[in-house]
Image (cartoon, rainbow, N blue to C red):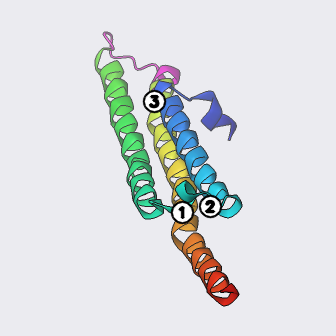
Amino acid sequence: MDAYWSYLGPMDWFIIGYGVLLMAVHIILIAARYLSSALWARQGLGVRRQFLLALSELLPLMGLLGTVVALLNTFLGMDSAADGYVDIPGLIHDFAPALTTTASGIIFVLINLFLNSVLWLVIPSRLKEEEAQEQAGD
């Protein structure tokens, strides 16, 4: 894990920030649905879930974009070596963001897909239970 944290670049921090923001929205919707009886917590939940799913699916694409950009920078650094000598530590430093952006995208898409599945699977069954309790109470 130390290698991951030591080579984070700007694209990684963007992916991490975006992923954490999506996580927060998922958690707020889950908590609102469980803890609130407000109308906004019930209405439009399906549309919100689909929108969050679409936003979550952008995370691995951002990681792939960061990978391609980092690889281009790595090859550019190799090409610009005037005397034919390739600086291995510099090459590793240029190549590392290609791996970390991929990892960032995958880590945060997995977390957000899990939270989205909680919205898809757990909450609708909870809604059915509440509706059954309301009908039984009538």
Residue 86 location in percent, x, y?
40, 20
Which one is earlier in the sequence, the residue at label 3 or at label 2?
A: 3
Neighbourhood count class around disc 1 (C-alpha, 10 Å): few under 14, some 14–19, many 20 upward: some
Whichever of labels 1 and 3 marks the residue nearer the N terminus, that label is 3
- Whether residue 52 is in magenta: the answer is no
Q: Mark 2 belongs to which amino acid?
A: Arg
Q: Residue at x 55, y 58 (%)?
A: 39
What kind of residue is marked 3? Met
Secondary structure beneath dot 3 equals helix
Label 2 with label 1: CB-CB less than 8 Å: yes
Residue at 33%, 14% in the rendered image: 81
Q: Is residue 106 above or below residue 88?
A: below
Q: Is residue 127 above or below residue 51?
A: below
Per the image, label 2 sits on a secondary structure element best described as: helix
Classify 102 as above or below 72.
below
Counting from the top left corner in percent of width and height, residue 2 is at 69, 36
Residue 33 shows which numbered tag?
2
* Label 2 Cα crowd, 10 Å radius (few <14 / some 14-19 / many 20+): many
Disc assigned to residue 42: 1
What are the residue bounds of the magenta stretch?
Answer: 81-91
Which type of secondary structure does the marked residue at label 1 adopt?
helix
Q: Main secondary structure of the magenta part?
A: loop
Left of 34 or right of it: where is 21?
A: left
Q: Residue at x 59, y 70 (%)?
A: 123
- Compared across the picture, whether 75 is left or right of 124 comes to left
**Image position, residue 91 (x, y; %):** 45, 25
Q: Would you name the residue on which mark 3 appears?
A: 11
The percent position of residue 11, horizontal first and vertical second, equals 45, 30
- Label 1 sits on what residue type? Arg
Outermost bottom residue: 136
The residue lying toward the viewer, choosing from 137 and 33, is: 137
